[in-house]
Amino acid sequence: SARSRADAVLVPVALELGSGQARAEDVPPLLRSLVRVTRRAAASRAADSGDSLARRLAGLSGEQQRELLIGVIREQAALVLGYQDVELVESDRSFRELGFDSLTAIELRNRLNAATGLKLPATLVFDYPTPQDLAEYLRGELVDDHADGGLDAELDRLAVMLSSAGADRRERERIGGRLAALLSEWNAPLRDSEAPDEADDIESATADELFELLDKEFGNS
């Protein structure tokens, strides 16, 4: 058969090159140089993945964001290197020590492009030599720490945590009490700033105005 022959054989085959434009992954690697493929679907999937990752990061603290990104990097690196166990990709070891070369570095970059939705440089793993370093870089690209200010960002994270918490009635009452106490403490300076104005109003009020104020506050017994 042709498969058992050592020498190359040319076979005349009629190919419909124009019809093979659906998805690049559907075309056998041997024929990909012959068939025009569109990248729109792949680009769309990459953007969706990046948006999903950015949303996951938005609800996390800085340290949790780093842990999540390190996990993504280690998972993709293990796939590139053919490791079954992601634990073999240590986060503090350099990519060179892990076995990356120029070709595998490009493959990892491409995988991270798809996972993050970013357009990363080809020298990525050499510019940021460990998974930890790379995670910090990706976090800077994906997370804007100053987008809404520090307190607003923390409140956003708190809102995500509260909405996803499966608390019972007693737990909700306990947490609600703490939130109410925090809100009261937060508003205290506002109340204090209003007090002098109220005192000035009382000092300048006439007798009739004072009686009207007392009547509003306590009502008729």
Image (tube, helix red, strand yellow):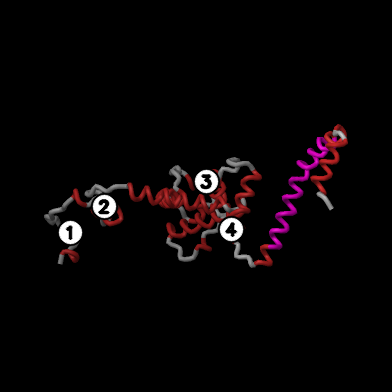
Q: Secondary structure at mark 4?
A: helix
Q: Residues within 10 Å of mark 4 (few under 14, many from 20)?
A: few
Q: Secondary structure at mark 2?
A: loop
The numbered disc on residue 163 is 4
Q: Looking at the picture, which amino acid does disc 1 mark?
A: Asp
Q: Residue at x 68, y 67 (%)?
A: 170
Q: CA distance from mark 1 to mark 4?
A: 66 Å
Q: Residues within 10 Å of mark 3 (few under 14, many from 20)?
A: many
Residue at image mark 3: 142
- Magenta span: predominant SS is helix
First in sequence: mark 2 or mark 4? 2
Image: 70 above or below 214? below
Residue at image mark 2: 22
Q: In the rendered structure, which segment of residues is drawn in magenta?
A: 173-199
Q: Residue at x 72, y 50 (%)?
A: 183
Q: Looking at the picture, which amino acid does disc 2 mark?
A: Ala
The residue closer to the viewer here, 183 or 50, is 183
Q: Looking at the picture, which amino acid does disc 4 mark?
A: Ser
Picture coordinates of residue 162 (x, y %)?
61, 58
- Do residues under tags 2 and 4 come within 8 Å of each other at their CB atoms? no
